[in-house]
Image (cartoon, helix red, strand yellow):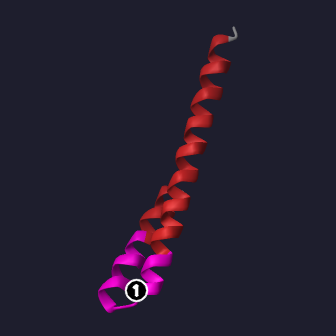
Amino acid sequence: MLSWVATFLVIALIAGILGFGGLAGASIEIAKIIFFVAIVLFLVSAVVGLARGRRI
């Protein structure tokens, strides 16, 4: 998922340089959403991993 974030950030940078402000803004927003979803999934995975590790 983080590779998607990097892809959208590159798209936003190129679009911003070329003057496509709307496309750049949309790409940044999509990158933010995907980034926060990835963080939430990581935290859920970490909590589940810790909970499973304690039950022996």
Q: Residue furthest left?
A: 17
Q: Main secondary structure of the magenta part?
A: helix
- Please tell me which residue is depicted at 45% across the width and 77% down the height of the picture: 25
Q: Is residue 15 covered in magenta? A: yes
- Please tell me which residue is depicted at 42% across the width and 64% down the height of the picture: 6
Examine the rendered structure and indicate whether residue 40 appears above or below residue 1.
above
- Quadrant the C terminus occupies: top right
Q: Is residue 39 covered in magenta? A: no
**Residue 47 x %, y %:** 60, 27
- Quadrant the N terminus occupies: bottom right
Q: Residue furthest bottom?
A: 19
**Residue 37 x %, y %:** 58, 52
| Residue under pointer 1 | 21
Examine the rendered structure and indicate whether residue 54 appears above or below residue 36.
above
Which amino acid is tagged 1? Gly
Please tell me how crowded label 1 is: few (under 14), some (14-19), or many (20+) other residues with Cα within 10 Å. some
Q: How many marks?
A: 1
Residue 16 shown left or right of residue 48 in the figure: left
Residue 32 shown left or right of residue 51 in the figure: left
Examine the rendered structure and indicate whether residue 45 appears above or below residue 28.
above
Which stretch appears magenta? 9-26
Q: Residue furthest top?
A: 56
Quadrant position of residue 54: top right
Q: Secondary structure at mark 1?
A: helix
Residue 49 shown left or right of residue 17 in the figure: right
- Please tell me which residue is depicted at 61% across the width and 35% down the height of the picture: 45
Residue closest to the eye, 21 or 45 = 21
**Residue 11 x %, y %:** 42, 78
